[in-house]
Amino acid sequence: MDNDKIIVFDTTLRDGEQSPGASLDVADKVTIAKQLARLNVDVIEAGFPVSSKAQFDATKIISTEVKGPIIAGLARCIEGDIDAAAEALKKAERPRIHTFVATSKIHLEKKFRKSEEEILEMAVAGVKRAKSYFDDIEFSPEDSARTGKDFLFRIIEAAINAGATTINIPDTVGYSNPDEFGSLIKEIFNKVPNIDRAILSVHCHNDLGLAVANTLSAVINGAQQVEVTINGVGERAGNASLEEVVMALKTRHNFYGKCIGINTREIVPTSRLVSNLMGMPVQPNKAIVGANAFAHEAGIHQDAVLKDASTYEIMTPEEVGLESNRIILGRHSGRHGLQQRLAELGYKLGKEEINRIYERFNEIADKKKEVFDEDLIALVGDETADYSEAYELEYFHILSGNKTVPTATVGLRRGDRSFQEAAVGDGPVDAACKAVDKITGLSVALADYSLRGVTGGKNAVGEVVVRITDNGQKYLGRGASTDVIEASIRAYLHAVNRLISAKEKQLQSKVEKAQL
């Protein structure tokens, strides 16, 4: 084996499926196995064949249909388990039986009620029986991290002499820490005389949040195989995450000095497939595959990333299968990020227009977590008018209810002057429009009103389109906001301003003609 190559053993379909509520049917397991082959993992642990008919069938089908990776089946050091695994794996291109027995004092006393010698005999017998079927045999002393070292070294040596080609060291309950676990791996190399005849593997659980750290510490100390799962799924708090271990080794190759054969561009597709089929959403801040892993909202970060992504990204999103990073527009975003996104949407706007839109953008961003493209499009339509605004909305207050007369107080600004009026109406929108009419002195008819949600969710931006008429002339107005009343007032005011602009232009034209 290449001393620099780390073997990636994926146990999503075995240990990962043992996550509470994460059971997969046979078809789902086969689908995931085929994707793991595309990901180019070295070993796929397909299941625990003796545990159920579904586990047996899934392992058998995967062994038949999936080519490339080694296909492993788990078995206790019990004849029936090993025979079932061998039967399920018999058509595999590259089969491996992974057999195990618990070795820690607490397991021997509480679970088995057997002596160390009896456990050692079980291990040797199990490995020998597995070896009678296939050449590739993996042995795990379960709960290695809590096993007495002298016994651990003895049982590893005996398993190798019995025919084990891979020795796996599990931190079954996530008890160890990086220094401690790394030292254990180093001691195994120093104290087990025949360890050079086997691959040394590690399998870490995440009960203390140290699974990835312990795995990488083991690699530093000589471990040649890592046992991992997609998204870190697994019993209790899960296992070492494949994507985190793999990308740490790749991104920090200068530190670890190890190579991997994983097709990292398949990481995100594999993560999403496993998440969907298991019904286990990935937390947004999950490293590598979380929704926020390559997302930037802070204005300072956005500005730097738009100039050079390496300022805040130590790997590229394309490396793990994403098309690009994400500039999240929210309350922490700056003008640069907003302007860049508007440009990507096809809007070439001047400085004054950007400033106006940025003010409205901040108002919306304060009300919802993320401002989407549809929100921006609605805002641009609201703010980039081909006329000068006579009146600007300063504030509004609505009093309404099923047993209350709808009342609206509206404050508008025109130049340096502020105006305020209140009115009642058939509803809050009608009352607000009447208050606007009082301020402007206009009396117009609302010919049409429509409201649509331009984004989904409870905090969606609503866009209102209105048409008003004055002496037979129609004027269109648009308004957008997370508050439908505000959107309605803005739309109505938009149309009124168009009317005022048209009247002013007509008056200006008459003055110019009179001067000729």
Image (cartoon, rainbow, N blue to C red):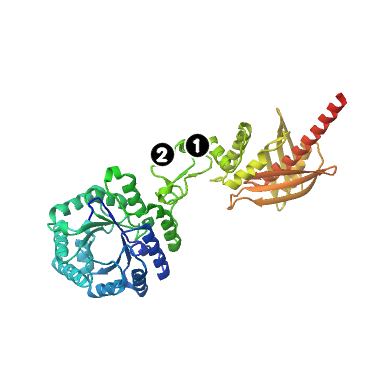
Q: Quadrant of residue 431?
A: top right
What is the x, y in percent for residue 162? 15, 67
Residue type at mark 2 is Ser
Q: Is residue 511 above or below residue 435?
A: above
Q: Is residue 265 visible?
A: yes
Along the viewing direction, whichever of 398 and 323 lies nearer the viewer: 323
Query: Total number of numbered labels?
Result: 2
- Are there few (<14), some (14-19), or many (20+) residues within 10 Å of tag 2? few
Q: Secondary structure at mark 1?
A: helix
Quarter that holds the C terminus: top right
Residue type at mark 1 is Gly
What is the x, y in percent for residue 14? 33, 65
Pointer 1 residue: 299
Comparing marks 1 and 2, which lies closer to the viewer?
A: 2
Pointer 2 residue: 310
Along the viewing direction, whichever of 180 and 91 lies nearer the viewer: 91
**Residue 110 located left or right of residue 508:** left
Quarter that holds the N terminus: bottom left
Circles 1, 2 touching at the beta carbon (< 8 Å): no
